[in-house]
Amino acid sequence: MANVTFYEKPGCINNTKQKKLLENAGHTLEVHNLLTTSWTVEQLRPFFGTRPVLEWFNPTAPRIKSGEIIPNQLDEKTALNLMIADPLLIRRPLIQVDDVYRVGFDAEQIETWIGLNASTPVTEDLETCPNSNK
């Protein structure tokens, strides 16, 4: 099983469910607060890999929902600097295992990467905040 570094927003319902799935699959978690981590461009950038900048952002962040920030209009440098200044903008969770970094919780991708409990497939959306419609 894997040693997983997991960056979350404390109190996030989906992050809690995601951690439980990983722990139930036998992984060991080292959990960090995404919002209070002192991010640098060099630390944050690897989590996004080759994903387009739009997919780096938490679509339910207040500044995105209000239209103040439009992720698909940003270049990489601007996006990273905005997220460092306001970590609520970062899509969650950020996950690291050894030298592999990922953003978001795609259960099928994680099953293939480090394994979840395949006998109980994930059928609910664990990325969209259940409070985002409030």
Image (cartoon, helix red, strand yellow):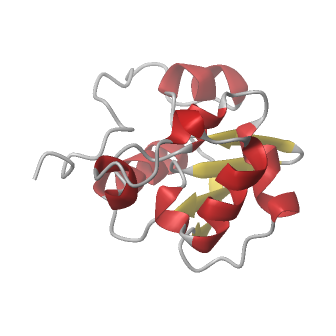
Residue at x-position 34% and y-position 48%: 67
Q: Tell me if residue 14 can be seen.
A: yes
Most foreground residue, 32 or 51: 51
Residue at x-position 64% and y-position 36%: 53
Most foreground residue, 127 or 91: 91
Q: Is residue 76 left or right of residue 66?
A: right
Q: Residue 91 at x, y = what percent?
A: 52, 48
Most foreground residue, 22 or 128: 128
Residue at x-position 66% and y-position 19%: 112
The answer to which quarter of the image holds residue 34 is: bottom right
Q: Residue 12 at x, y = what percent?
A: 34, 61
Q: Tell me if residue 30 can be seen.
A: no
The answer to which quarter of the image holds residue 6 is: bottom right
Q: Is 44 located above or below residue 112 in the figure?
A: below
**Residue at the far left in the pictured view:** 134
Residue at x-position 51% and y-position 37%: 105
Most foreground residue, 10 or 45: 45
Q: Is residue 25 left or right of residue 75?
A: left
Q: Residue 63 at x, y = what percent?
A: 38, 58
